[in-house]
Amino acid sequence: MIFDVEKTYALIAGTRFGRIRYVAQTGSTNDDAQELLGAPGSAGLVLLAEHQQAGKGRRARPWIAPAGSSLLFTAVLPDPIPAAALWAVPFWTGLTITEAVEKHTGLRPALQWPNDLLLGEHKCCGILAISRVMGNRASVGCGVGLNVRRPKDAASLAEIEPKPAFISDRVATVEREALLAAILRSFDARLGMLEDPAGIARAWESRAALKGSRYRIALDVGETFEAEAQRIDDDGSLIVRAADRERRVAMADARVLR
């Protein structure tokens, strides 16, 4: 089903994310946005695609989404943010999307460190921020892949492990146009938070009910361990308790296993 951009425009009028560039197919909306960051006219632009040929998650892992099943977009923030706050952008993005999904559908996705949203035990959304740093400020694009409608062709999901969740698994009718509008309105309302990265971390911890949550963590060095989450550090690292001691897990050095 083709995305009705005009329907979304009617719902985002007056926000700072009022322009959408929609294509049927591209390599990656993040790659497209990276070329535009900081350029005149890019502020507040939303790049939206039905299908990505080279969609990527963290650490260049492939992001697979059958055409028409998801919201695949990169939203360029309307103003540069402090470069020191870049680590907080994925947490801010996850927080705002979770709130928007709950308001629009009644579902309450769970937040999982560092950049995933879950429905039950399965991932429904991944986030990857991009940036261009200029001095102490940075232009930012928030890349999002949100699974909305489960494809009828189950074979199209065969390559995805672990198996994904879709909003339509739990909500019979959901319009991608209205859901995107809800997310962009949430982005617009929450922009001020980006001046306070520590406040974002505390809000994320609260929404995720982080303290005491169990995580199974795989470090790039080959170690896998289970731990109890404690808090988000001031660079986005996860502080956990394992074997009666605290450990710091950097975003760049680990992934969470489900």
Image: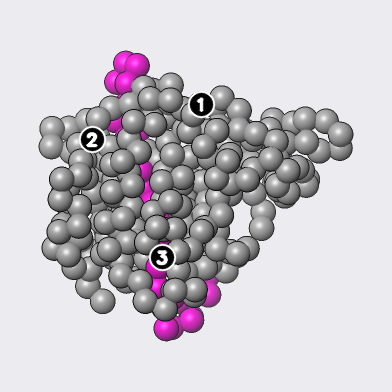
Asked if marks 2 and 3 touch (Cβ < 8 Å), the reply is no
Mark 3 or 1, closer to the camera:
3
Asked if marks 3 and 1 touch (Cβ < 8 Å), the reply is no
Which amino acid is tagged 3?
Thr
Which amino acid is tagged 2?
Pro
Label 2 packing within 10 angstroms: few (<14), some (14-19), many (20+): some
Q: Could you say whether the residue bearing mark 3 is in a helix, strand or loop?
A: helix
Q: Could you say whether the residue bearing mark 1 is in a helix, strand or loop?
A: helix
Label 3 packing within 10 angstroms: few (<14), some (14-19), many (20+): some
Magenta span: 131-160
Residue occupied by mark 1: 198
Query: In the rendered image, which quarter contains the C terminus?
Result: bottom right
Image position of 107 with respect to 185: above or below = below
Identify which residue is drawn at 46% across, 46% down.
94
List x then y, in percent, for residue 49.
Answer: 27, 60
Which amino acid is tagged 1?
Ala
Residue 70 seen in render: yes
In the image, residue 134 lies in the stretch drawn in magenta? yes
Q: Which mark is residue 41?
A: none
Label 3 to label 1: alpha-carbon separation:
29 Å
Left or right of 159? Residue 176 is left
Quarter location, residue 102: bottom left
Q: Which mark is residue 105?
A: 3
List x then y, in percent, for residue 120.
Answer: 60, 64
Please give the count of numbered marks on the rendered protein.
Answer: 3
Closer to the chain start, of discs 1 and 2, is 2
Identify which residue is drawn at 33% across, 47% down.
186
Asked if marks 1 and 2 touch (Cβ < 8 Å), the reply is no
Closer to the chain start, of discs 2 and 3, is 2
Identify which residue is drawn at 53% across, 67% down.
164
Residue occupied by mark 2: 78
Label 1 to label 2: alpha-carbon separation:
21 Å
